[in-house]
Image (tube, coloured by chain):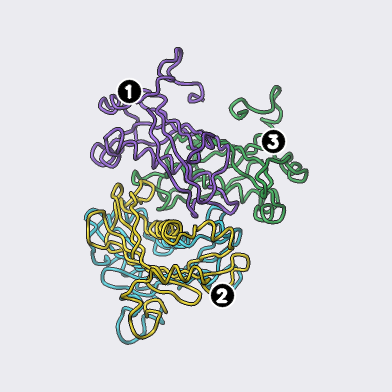
Chain colours: A purple, B green, C cyan, D yellow
Amino acid sequence: MSFTKQYKVRFSDTDPAGVMYYPRFLDRFHAVFEDWFDECLKMPYRWMLEDTRLGFPTVHTQCDYREPCRFGETIVIELILTRIGSRSFTCTYKIRALGEDVVRVHAQVVTATVNLDTFEAVEVPARLRRQLEMRLEPTVRDVSGPAVPAAVSE
Amino acid sequence: MSFTKQYKVRFSDTDPAGVMYYPRFLDRFHAVFEDWFDECLKMPYRWMLEDTRLGFPTVHTQCDYREPCRFGETIVIELILTRIGSRSFTCTYKIRALGEDVVRVHAQVVTATVNLDTFEAVEVPARLRRQLEMRLEPTVRDVSGPAVPAAVSE
Amino acid sequence: MSFTKQYKVRFSDTDPAGVMYYPRFLDRFHAVFEDWFDECLKMPYRWMLEDTRLGFPTVHTQCDYREPCRFGETIVIELILTRIGSRSFTCTYKIRALGEDVVRVHAQVVTATVNLDTFEAVEVPARLRRQLEMRLEPTVRDVSGPAVPAAVSE
Amino acid sequence: MSFTKQYKVRFSDTDPAGVMYYPRFLDRFHAVFEDWFDECLKMPYRWMLEDTRLGFPTVHTQCDYREPCRFGETIVIELILTRIGSRSFTCTYKIRALGEDVVRVHAQVVTATVNLDTFEAVEVPARLRRQLEMRLEPTVRDVSGPAVPAAVSE
């Protein structure tokens, strides 16, 4: 149920230490998030913003940078929907080098749903919720206990 | 003991929703981190990298984006050193609008110390450790129990 | 009549070759352009966009990168208004290292005035024109012949 | 003989006016330039830099931004090699929306060849020159008169 995109680490992604500059990963997560709306949820991201005036501000991120990614490497970015709340949802991202199993970067990003004109939180709209529920990862959906994993609630 | 810098939110920091794009905050944290080395620790960041070959990769970030920052606003970014480990240390960052008390963005960033030529973790060098210890926040240093807050102990 | 701002070259401005990545200069020009509206023209840039719905898209840039700027250097960015047209104007930018005379980067940026809602070119509004005319560099304003320098008309 | 790459305009490429922020185009040109080395010249860009210590600083850019590119649009970036000098070469870039003929952005970028350790200009190495000569656009190569187009010599 995961969604993956490849990305080639660019000269401009890389800092003087020769590795991908850490805020750039968050930028790449957002690009995959946009593609996920466009290609997987079939609710184009631009249409959501411009026509429905639903916005998706990031309200929490946590990210482990375990191994550096170097200029010229092709990385695979995996998006997994791991939580659906009433007015937010959480995507987990894993980055690996193409052809490798080791997760180099592991992140969770909590996205709120807001009215873009007021920036107030709104319920995840029904149509979007249906799309999300079909893609929620079973290992997370099936756990007993609190719907929000501890790692997200802090 | 905290270190603050002002920053004016730029046109290019702002996304089509009219607010500062979330990875940009992490970029600003790094700019303040560089200034902290240059102006507070008196160990210029460029000199650290180029002459001592000590590197400071970010290994963990967590960030709460509580309120948006808008184009044209001046924000105050506060850096507080909140943990010193053997081969890493943690800075807490708080962002407020100039003249306001409300924290809009709250983050923790764990920085490792590595040999830039091998990218292997090394002990925080003695001279840097002395500088850091003088600036560790008392509220954190004085707590009984584990020196490393749970949220940071990954 | 010129307007200058200092800027410290950041780790994140710098590419793996150790020098400021060339598109970053254009980003810095825009930041100085915003400050020029805010501090010199006294017509805040955000107010122009949001309240008057006048937009300032860049329609032409030319830039000579003569000498690199390195991580940690402080540079001085000078903005000089060198042309006022009917629906556009031109700023010349010069970048020097702090305390040095040599121009490292020299650029011209042509900005159009548009209605932000339609993106159609509009006349430079009278109030803005008055502000601009007071700041036009004499060496350019006094030349006989075409008001638009050849280098800009392409 | 041209080389093209598609690119989807991202949320983060777009400014509050809803269009691609102009320095971002230069960043995209560089990404296509890297791919051109990797896929067309068969001299991988990273290998050039790291193993041969040949660097490719941009020494001149000129760019006409004729029509805006909007968030969510797919654009086609075309790279055409239009000049080979002794210690530099020029690429022309044209950006169109996918499926359209109109050129929205038209640019020329002059790249020097330098020794990355000294940053001094060096002759275009023979092996690279052979690769470049095979790809020089005939309409430019065949013109009589100066090898360097006027537009580049300024």
Identify the subunit bearing mark 3: B
Identify the subunit bearing mark 1: A
Mark 1, residue position: A133
Quadrant of the rendered structure where residue C90 is?
bottom left
Q: Are marks 2 and 1 in contact (CB under 8 Å)?
A: no
The quarter of the rendered structure image containing the N terminus of chain A is: top left
Circle 3 packing at 10 Å, graded few (<14), some (14-19), many (20+), is many
Can you tell which of label 1 and label 3 is closer to the viewer? Answer: 1
Judge from the rendering whether residue A8 lies leftward or rightward of residue B139; answer left or right.
left
Q: Is residue A35 above or below residue D46?
A: above
Q: Amino acid at mark 1?
A: Glu
Mark 2, residue position: C102
Q: Residue at x 33, y 87 (%)?
A: C144
Q: Are marks 3 and 2 in contact (CB under 8 Å)?
A: no
Q: CA distance from mark 2 to mark 1?
A: 61 Å
Q: Are marks 1 and 3 in contact (CB under 8 Å)?
A: no
Q: CA distance from mark 1 to mark 3?
A: 42 Å
Quadrant of the rendered structure where residue D80 is?
bottom left
Mark 3, residue position: B84
Q: Residue at x 28, y 49 (%)?
A: D73
| Image position, residue A42 (x, y; %) | 27, 35
Circle 2 packing at 10 Å, graded few (<14), some (14-19), many (20+), is few
Q: CA distance from mark 3 to mark 2?
A: 43 Å
Quadrant of the rendered structure where residue D63 is?
bottom left
Query: Which residue is more in the foreground, B114 or A111?
Result: B114
Q: Amino acid at mark 3?
A: Ile
Q: Is residue B119 above or below residue A55?
A: below
Is residue D147 visible in the rendered structure shown here? Answer: yes
| Image position, residue B102 (x, y; %) | 49, 36
